[in-house]
Every structure is written in C-alpha cells, then in structure tokens.
Image (cartoon, rainbow, N blue to C red):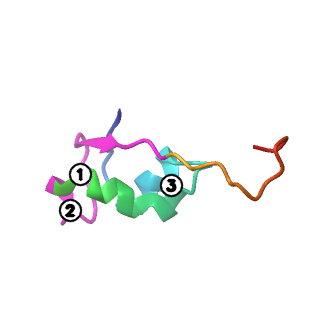
Amino acid sequence: MRKYTTIQGDTWDGIAFRVYEGKGGEKLTTILIEANPTHINTVIFPAGIPLVIPEVYYPASKSLPPWVR
C-alpha cells in the first residue's frame, strides 16, 4: 500500500486527482477518504500528514473482444 504525505493546502479531491491520475482521479476521492478515517473531517490539510493510498483495481470487461482485454 502506498503512502502520501500532504503539503500545505492539499484537499481530498486534489490528492485523489494527483495520486490516481489516469485511473479516475478525483472520482476516487471517496475511496481515499474511507482509507483514512482519522482525517475524515479535514477539508484543507496542513503539511506533513501521512495518508494511506489504497490501490484501485478494475475488473476486465467481458464485453470487449479478447485481443483488447
């Protein structure tokens, strides 16, 4: 599991956008918040807060042809 250390002014959606680039970005904010329940009420982070960054896996689509999967 990856870790992320906040910088002054970080927000949940900004962190999600940065760490999940190409995987859904800020749409995965909820997953990030749920993995860090002790900071659930934080809106704007100070510097130096360690956060857990859970991995996100997508199942292979069964509607795609075999050569695309």
Q: Where's residue 3, x and y in %? A: 33, 35
> On the rendered image, what quadrant is the N terminus found in?
top left
Q: Secondary structure at mark 2?
A: loop
Read off the residue under disc 1: 36
Query: What are the residue bounds of the magenta stretch?
Result: 38-56
| Distance in Å between CA atoms under marks 2 and 1 | 7 Å
How far apart, in angstroms, are the residues tagged by discs 3 and 2?
Answer: 17 Å
Residue that carries the numbered disc 2 in the rendered image: 40
Q: Position of residue 12 (x, y in %)?
A: 36, 59
Q: Amino acid at mark 2?
A: Ile
Query: Could you tell me residue 11's position as x and y percent?
Result: 35, 59
- Viewer-proximal residue among 9 and 38: 38
| Dominant SS type (magenta) | loop
Q: CA distance from mark 3 to mark 1?
A: 16 Å
Left or right: 55, with 35 as reference point: right
Nearer-N-terminus badge (3/1): 3
Query: In the picture, which quadrant includes the C terminus?
Result: top right
Helix, strand or loop at label 1? It is loop
**Circle nearer the viewer, 3 or 1:** 1
Q: Residue at x 70, y 55 (%)?
A: 62
Residue at screen point 75% across, 59% down: 63
Say if mark 2 contacts mark 1, CB within 8 Å.
Answer: yes
Q: Which of the 4 image quarters holds residue 6? A: top left
| Residue that badge 3 annotates | 17
- Label 3, secondary structure: give it: helix
Residue 7 forms part of the magenta stretch = no
| Residue 10 at least partly seen | no
35, 11: nearer the viewer: 35
**Image coordinates for residue 57, horizontal then vertical, percent:** 51, 45
Q: Give the residue type at disc 1.
A: Asn
